[in-house]
Image (spheres, rainbow, N blue to C red):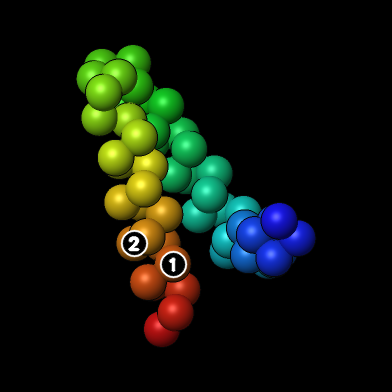
Amino acid sequence: MRKLLQLIFGDIRNVTSVAVALLAAYGLSRVAPAAAGALLVLILIAAAAVQAF
């Protein structure tokens, strides 16, 4: 659990990525609740991939 929290809150880019992903998933959940979880996963994976480079 400690490693997961460190991964998410390690630096400002991580915090920003998670915040943007949550806001996007929340926005989508208002329109299409069933798709919000999938969107959250995709955005978090994309954010991790971008930060890896």
- Mark 1 lies on a secondary structure that is helix
Residue 9 seen anywhere in this rendered image of the structure: no
Decide if residue 29 is in sight here. yes
Marking on residue 46: 2
Residue 37 location, quadrant:
top left
Residue under circle 1?
48
Q: Which of the 4 quarters of the picture holds residue 27?
A: top left
Find numbered disc 2 in the image and state the secondary structure of the residue it sits on.
helix
Residue 7 image offset from top left, x and y in percent: 63, 65
Q: Quadrant of residue 4?
A: bottom right
**Left or right of residue 39: residue 44:** right
Query: Percent position (x, y) of residue 40?
Result: 38, 42
- In the picture, the quarter occupied by the C terminus is bottom left
**Residue type, numbered disc 1:** Ala
Give the amino acid type for the residue marked by disc 2 in the picture.
Ala
Q: Is residue 34 above or below residue 37?
A: above
Residue farthest right in this picture? 2
Residue at horizontal 47 percent and vertical 44 percent from the top: 20
| Disc 2 packing (10 Å; few <14; some 14–19; many ≥20) | some
